[in-house]
Image (cartoon, grey):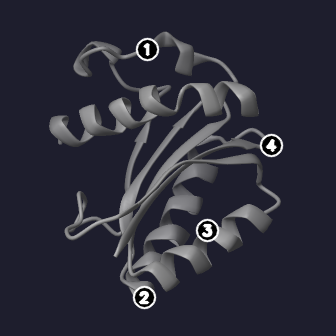
Amino acid sequence: MIRLIYASSATTEFTESKLMKLLGQARANNQKENISGLLLYAKGNFFQVLEGEKQAVEKLYCKIQQDERHTSVVVIDRSDITRRAFPDWSMGFKNLETFDSCEVRGYNTIFNKALSEKDMEELGPDIIYLIEQFKKTW
């Protein structure tokens, strides 16, 4: 199995209803492919963890790269794993624009703005830390 963490920028604004529709589609598709993970969204930025069998995760990631709703797709981490961090979630979700940042230790306000591809590459360790902190709060 592998874990793939990526960041990307949305090509259009995502309202709460658009996010919920995207999340519903992701959960249904991931369940079929036995993929688990987490999706975070803030200010036009997506941060996502995908876990599962290598072929299924890589196939999904290729689709994401070609999805016209994303641009500047950057792999933050790609690792072999023996167990899932999110085994019970076809896709956990948190909209970072609507949560209390005090809930997450060390939350960085850098995520409160649109990020460039260069920003995403440089913030890789911070993005991984943020994901780990969200996992602890759930």
Residue at 49% over, 83% down? 56
What secondary structure is marked by label 2?
Answer: helix
Disc 1 target residue: 108
Sequence-earlier tag: 1 or 3: 3
Q: Report which quarter residue 130 is drawn in.
A: top left
Q: In terms of secondary structure, where does tag 4 sit?
A: loop
Give the residue displayed 42% in from the left and 88% down from the top: 32
Query: Label 2: which residue?
Result: 32
Q: Which residue is mark 3?
A: 61
* Label 3: few (<14), some (14–19) or many (≥20) C-alpha neighbours in 10 Å: some
Contact between labelled residues 4 and 3, with CB atoms less than 8 Å apart: no
Mark 1 and 2 residues: CB-CB less than 8 Å, in contact? Answer: no
Q: Which residue is mark 4?
A: 12
Q: Nearer the viewer, mark 3 or mark 4?
A: 3
Determine the residue positioned at 25% across, 32% down. 133
Task: Locate residue 48, reporting x and y percent.
Answer: 49, 51
- Gap between marks 3 and 4 measured at Cα: 20 Å
Residue kind at label 4, given as amino acid type: Thr
Of mark 3 and mark 4, the one earlier in the sequence is 4
